[in-house]
Amino acid sequence: MERTYVMLKPDAYERRLIGEIISRIERKNFKITDIKMLNLNKAMLAKHYAHLVNKPFYSALEKFMMSGPVVAMIVEGENVVQGIRNLMGATKWLEAIQGTIRGDYANNTTENLIHGSDSIENAEIEIERFFGSK
Ligand code: UDP
Ligand code: MG
């Protein structure tokens, strides 16, 4: 069965939206097979966001991602990688349509509540990074 890596960001925790977002994932009938809360550090973030470390917004992103705990999950289901991306909505908050998590709750492109892997290959890399071999 396909798996993906999902991470609820510190704004989801701060805004008390953890339950709401998990409910949306479960209502879609995706299965959470592991879950934990953790605090990220600079080294973990530099690996996770390696494609962004040279962007002008990276230091703000890093600060935000270390501002509180994240909730890390392994989520399983048919076509779950794309399915979670659909539930999330677009990266840029103004492009995220209503009914998606970002469309309904985000008004900022950095503080956008949720991470979901962008490919099956990256999902396995991210699961290994945050949960070890499973
Ligand atoms: N991000 C940002 N400004 C941007 C683009 C991205 O702060 O212009 C942040 C945002 O939190 C985003 C994360 O960097 O979720 C990772 O960016 P990516 O392009 O991988 O978007 P995602 O896969 O999260 O939709
Ligand atoms: Mg991404």
Image (cartoon, rainbow, N blue to C red):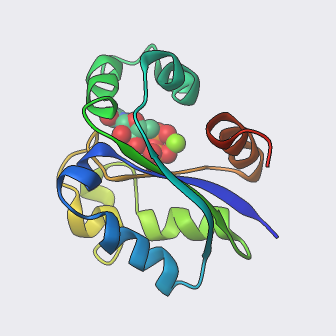
The answer to whether residue 37 is left or right of residue 60 is right
Residue occupying image coordinates x 49% and y 74%: 25
Residue 83 x/y as whole percent: 59, 71
The quadrant in which the N terminus is found is bottom right
Pick whichever, 90 or 106, lies toward us: 106
User: In the figure, is residue 112 to the left or right of 52?
Assistant: left
Report the label total: 0
Whole-percent x, y for residue 92 in the image:
32, 49
Q: Quadrant of residue 133?
A: top right
Residue at 70% x, 74% y is 77
Vertical placement of 133 versus 76: above or below?
A: above
72 and 86: which is toward the camera:
72
Residue at (17% x, 57% y) in the render: 15
* Residue at horizontal 66 percent and vertical 40 percent from the top: 126
Q: Nearer the viewer, residue 13 or 89?
A: 13
Give the x, y percent position of residue 104.
Answer: 24, 70
